[in-house]
Image (tube, grey):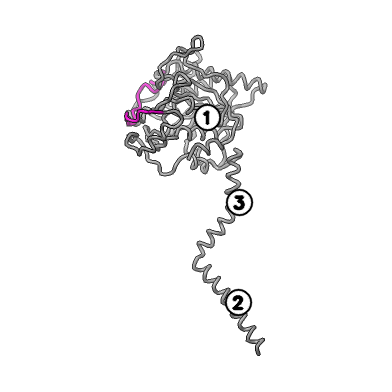
């Protein structure tokens, strides 16, 4: 009799336990499912972080979410009206004291394209800029002008075509010394209004993948020339795997990133985030040709001129390019090159030296700098 009662009690207890578990799962099925998924995904998350730090294949969208703070306010907004701690962040790495007072709202000007491009690109207004169609005739005319030794650079930066051409010549020479014949290079131009840099790349000694150069921007371009292929920046960022470019070029673009002048999110370290993104898009030992406003001497501090642009200090440049090694000397504009080792110039937005950088390190230094 006691044995029967014990069996009944144990059976009842087991039934109640099973019933409680069943009810709990029924009431909190979503929570249970979430915990289960988390347990499954956790090793993958750890693995992803390890891959990022080793600079292996990784999801671009997740990397870029780390580089760019979510819900950042969109510009243009007066930087002087931002909280004091945000203003102070703009001055990091010897960039202060900065003058955050000047405020520009877009202000794209007709002089932001080369003279050769003017007949082909219609200027709409200071906000919309230029028409976004690049015809084959436009590209051909600029390439011919470059081949004939004409200055095809933007009037704001006269002679900058020579800087880009010199950087590409030195890079082509190095690639040829490494591999003869040269391996085809996948080249990306980051940020363009007119195809003057693209024309120099197409005219260079580089052997190009599919005989074309790629260009990316946040604003869509309609390109009618088979020698140039456009990729929307958002599409580059959302791709799961790295596009793995061999060479990326950026001239007079990084200094605006994060200031909100052109409607982009306000981010005190947007310039560093942009270079980190290009680093992630490059192959191992890939090359980054970078032109940007710099101070004239290594001791000078940089500055942020409102939401217009930055003039970079050497320390800021070092932090921004922490994943690279500098190859050779900076390439100054022809009229501003050092004489007897002394560089005489006024640090302003028109002094834009070009640096050739080689990707030699992983992403971990950017993970430390960027919040």
In the figure, residue 151 lies in which quadrant?
top left
Callout 1 environment at 10 Å: few (<14), some (14 to 19), or many (20+)? many
Residue 333, compared with residue 219, is above or below; it is: above
Q: Residue at x 51, y 12 (%)?
A: 341
Identify the element where label 2 is drawn.
Answer: helix
Point out the tag, 3 or 1, that comes first from the N-terminus. 3
* Most foreground residue, 226 or 276: 276
Q: Which numbered dot is residue 43?
A: 3
Residue 53, compared with residue 138, is above or below; it is: below
Q: Is residue 162 magenta?
A: no
Which residues fall within the magenta stretch? 96-118
Callout 3 environment at 10 Å: few (<14), some (14 to 19), or many (20+)? few
Q: Which numbered dot is residue 306?
A: none
Q: In x, y percent, where is residue 93?
A: 46, 30
* Most foreground residue, 350 or 165: 350
Point out the tag, 1 or 2, that comes first from the N-terminus. 2
Q: Is residue 98 magenta?
A: yes
Circle 1 residue: 321
Point out the tag, 2 or 3, that comes first from the N-terminus. 2
Q: Residue at x 44, y 25 (%)?
A: 312
Q: In x, y percent, where is residue 256?
A: 41, 30
Circle 2 residue: 14
Is residue 130 shown to the viewer in this render?
no
């Amino acid at each position: 009799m006691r044995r029967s009662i014990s069996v009944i009690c144990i059976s009842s207890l087991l039934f109640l336990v099973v019933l409680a578990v069943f009810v709990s799962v029924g009431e909190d099925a979503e929570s249970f499912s979430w915990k289960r998924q988390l347990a499954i995904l956790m090793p993958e998350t750890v693995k992803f972080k390890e891959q990022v730090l080793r600079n292996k294949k990784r999801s671009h969208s997740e990397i870029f979410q780390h580089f760019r703070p979510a819900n950042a306010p969109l510009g243009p907004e007066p930087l002087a009206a931002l909280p004091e701690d945000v203003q102070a962040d703009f001055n990091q790495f010897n960039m202060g004291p900065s003058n955050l007072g000047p405020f520009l709202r877009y202000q794209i000007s007709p002089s932001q394209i080369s003279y050769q491009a003017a007949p082909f690109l219609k200027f709409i207004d200071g906000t919309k800029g230029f028409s976004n169609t690049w015809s084959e005739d436009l590209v051909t005319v600029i390439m011919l002008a470059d081949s004939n030794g004409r200055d095809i650079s933007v009037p704001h930066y006269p002679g900058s075509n020579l800087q880009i051409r010199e950087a590409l010549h030195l890079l082509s020479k190095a690639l040829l010394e490494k591999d003869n014949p040269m391996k085809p290079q996948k080249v990306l131009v980051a940020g363009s209004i007119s195809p003057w840099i693209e024309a120099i790349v197409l005219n260079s000694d580089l052997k190009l993948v599919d005989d074309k150069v790629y260009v990316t921007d946040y604003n869509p371009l309609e390109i009618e020339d088979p020698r140039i292929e456009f990729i929307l920046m958002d599409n580059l960022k959302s791709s799961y795997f790295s596009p793995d470019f061999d060479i990326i070029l950026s001239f007079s673009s990084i200094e605006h990133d994060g200031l909100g002048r052109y409607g982009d999110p306000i981010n005190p370290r947007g310039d560093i985030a942009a270079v980190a993104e290009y680093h992630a898009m490059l192959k191992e030992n890939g090359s980054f040709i970078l032109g940007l406003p710099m101070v004239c001497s290594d001791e000078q501090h940089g500055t942020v001129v409102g939401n217009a642009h930055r003039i970079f200090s050497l320390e800021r440049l070092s932090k921004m390019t922490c994943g690279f090694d500098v190859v050779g000397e900076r390439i100054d504009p022809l009229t501003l090159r050092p004489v007897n080792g002394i560089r005489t110039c006024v640090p302003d937005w028109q002094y834009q030296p070009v640096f050739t950088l080689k990707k030699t390190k992983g992403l971990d230094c950017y993970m430390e700098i960027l919040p």
